[in-house]
Amino acid sequence: MAYTGRRGVLATAAGALAAVAAGGRAQAAQGPKPDERGRPAPAAPPRAAVVEFRGMWTASVQNVDWPSESGLPAGEQKAELLALLDTAVRRRLNAVVLQVRPAADAMWPGAREPWSQWLTGEQGADPGWDPLGTAVAEAHARGLELHAWFNPYRVANHTDPDLLAPGHPARRNPDWTVPYGGKLYYNPGLPEVRRFVQEAMLDAVSRYAVDGVHWDDYFYPYPVEGEEFDDDEAYAQYGGAFADRAAWRRHNTDTLVREMSERLRRLRPAARFGISPFAVWRNDDRDPLGSPTRAGLGTYDDLYADTRKWVREGWIDYVVPQVYWPIGHPTADYAALVPWWARTVAGTGVQLYVGEALFRCAPDSPTPAWRDPKELSRHVTLGRRYPEVRGHVYFSATQVVADPAGAMARVVADHYPTAAAPR
């Protein structure tokens, strides 16, 4: 997700993270509560007559949601994961979007990249269990979909290749990487990089019955003032047929999306491909096709991600725009963006789910709307006015558990009286 746009999440969620960690450790000590046959609870809920996607993002990068900290014993990591799945069931959600490749690493064995540092504290160190395999099995046992969330190009939250695990593909191929904004990225302009990152992600898809492949909003990185993303050599080699560098970069991102879509549909046709972009494609003062917003950033011009095109071309199965503003916001009004996205997906067959900023809902939020526990409930009410809106996804799992402002509980009470099928 756009951690640039979620800087407050690490601070505002600190208390909630502690609660999740404590709850997970308590469960690890006590063991999962069994059902009448001695199996882990809860049992899968019955299929519901209501069809509505109700998702929960679970971020592993920087231990935002899970595991609560690096280096926990395998039993505690698993207990925390199961506790989050159980919470999703209690909240009458039906899908968990679990981050399994946060930074050119992996949360499953035998992958093309090293084990994630967010598991053990040391990149490449075996945690002693299979997190993704466990997540898929346990989610399905509870009647939940499990969407595997991958970040295509982020390599590390630092710029020193020597800090990567020995044998890391980025260390073996230093010309694949670009340092930018204090982080290290794979270069999207290199065809060999695009092939590799697809293979790295499809490795998980080939091994596990995931219900979806999910990407967030990191393609080319968010702009950093005073810095340039140095892809000069790649542009000189591959960009000659394009009007400018921006068009070439958009082509590179389009190619990644289109190729991944084609390969996923061949490899696992039942799995859906979804992307969660920053919600503003372009402002309508810049492009008449854009949204009635005045945001300072748009995916088309700043991230080189033509999100509207991906929908119109049908390259993705669902889109989850991160509409992380309240109703009535002066520059990016939730009540203006949701109709724009509804018009964008209309007639395409692409499902629209709205990304909700649960992490902003806090009693001490500087924005009055986010202090009101009814704000997110109003979002769901508004979304249901548009038949194209087929559900909502909440960022993130920590706040689904702790719910400091009571916003999630209000959504459940007002809108989720029974279970729902995700599709």
Image (spheres, rainbow, N blue to C red):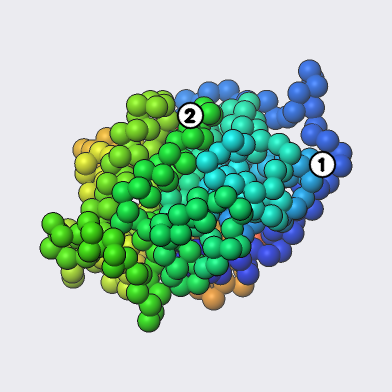
Nearer to us in this view, 60 or 167:
167
- Is residue 45 visible from the viewing direction of this image? yes
Q: Secondary structure at mark 2?
A: helix
For residue 408, which numbered disc appears in the image? none
**Image quadrant where one finds the C terminus:** top left
Where is residue 8? Give x, y as percent.
Answer: 56, 69
Nearer to us in this view, 285 or 306:
306
Quarter of image, res 220: bottom left
- Say few, some or many: other residues with alpha carbon within 10 Å of mark 1 (under 14 / 14 to 19 / 20 or more): many
Where is residue 358? Give x, y as percent.
Answer: 54, 57
For residue 206, which numbered disc appears in the image? 2
Q: Residue at x 68, y 25 (%)?
A: 43
Between the C-alphas of marks 1 and 2, the distance is 30 Å
Q: Residue at x 79, y 34 (%)?
A: 32
Amino acid at circle 2: Ser
Quarter of image, res 287: bottom left
For residue 28, which numbered disc appears in the image? 1
Where is residue 327? Give x, y as percent.
Answer: 40, 63
Q: Examine the rendered structure and indicate whether residue 81 appears above or below residue 39.
A: below
